Amino acid sequence: MTASARELLETARKDLAPGEHENRLVPLIAAGTASRKALAALAAEQHRIIVSDWRSFLVLASRCENPAAGAFFSGLAAGEGLALDNLGKFATAAGLDAAALSEYRPLAGCQAYPSYLAWLALNGEPTDVTLAVVANFAAWGNYCAAVATGLRTHYGFDDEGCSFFDFFAAPAPDGDEAAIAIVQAGLDAGRGTDAAFEYGRLIQSYELMFWNTLADLA
């Protein structure tokens, strides 16, 4: 890799951005045509994902030689912890109590994403994982913004019920600057590889698999 971290991130976002019609569930929620069953499954699947991703980010933090990179992944883990509380409010609004969440049987297509992130936590070069994960944030945030609007407009969800999606739809206070600095430091130390784009491509593919698996319930 010879480009700067900022250039790599811009390229990754452009190359990995999903097509307009690749996500089949979000447009259904935005239009109010997704079933309540699909919304409940979305809450239950995300519950497992958030818990798994929280642990994966902590593992990544522990593997970072650069303290700033470790702090970055620890911060992502802390964000997952905050999101878990908001997710409980969405689950309640979707009609799920603690027993229903516990009894829910997850779908393989939905759990491929956190399984891959767990693999990256153990095997991926943190510099590459940083680039791949951040490149995906824009698509994830846009999906969450559209879902929050759809839930309010068509399903009668209040601010508490939408808080999980509002949380992820909000831009990071410092934008991409922290991640760019971390990736640049990794590149300067010779730790960045072309695998970052492979990681990013698979992350985006598994995320679409998540949404589209749920779309089959809608």
Image: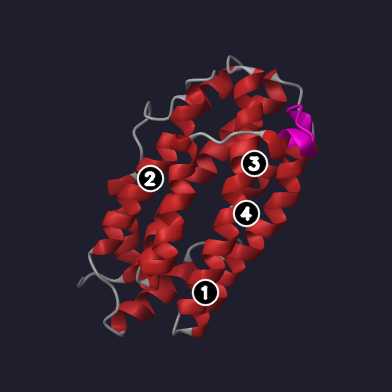
Cα distance in 3D space between marks 1 and 3: 25 Å
**Residue 178 shows in this picture:** no
Residue picked out by circle 2:
204
Please give the label number shown on residue 22: none
Say which element carries label 2: helix
Q: Is residue 42 above or below residue 31?
A: below
Say which element carries label 3: helix
The magenta-colored residue range is 91-100
Residue 34, position in %: x, y? 58, 18
**The image quarter in which residue 119 lies:** bottom left
Cα distance in 3D space between marks 4 and 3: 16 Å
Local crowd size for mark 4, using a 10 Å CA cut-off: few (<14), some (14–19), many (≥20): some
Question: Which residue occupies the extreme left position in the image?
Answer: 2
Sequence-wise, the earlier of marks 3 and 2 is 3
Sequence-wise, the earlier of marks 4 and 3 is 4
Left-right relation of 217 to 200: right
Give the label, 1 or 2, closer to the camera.
Answer: 1
Residue 48, position in %: x, y? 60, 46
Residue picked out by circle 3:
165
Residue 190, position in %: x, y? 26, 82
Q: Residue at x 31, y 49 (%)?
A: 201
Question: Is residue 30 within the magenta segment?
Answer: no
Local crowd size for mark 1, using a 10 Å CA cut-off: few (<14), some (14–19), many (≥20): many
Question: Which residue occupies the extreme top position in the image?
Answer: 33
Q: Is residue 147 above or below residue 177?
A: above
Residue picked out by circle 1:
61
Cα distance in 3D space between marks 2 and 4: 19 Å
Local crowd size for mark 3, using a 10 Å CA cut-off: few (<14), some (14–19), many (≥20): many
Give the label, 3 or 2, closer to the camera.
Answer: 2
Sequence-wise, the earlier of marks 2 and 4 is 4
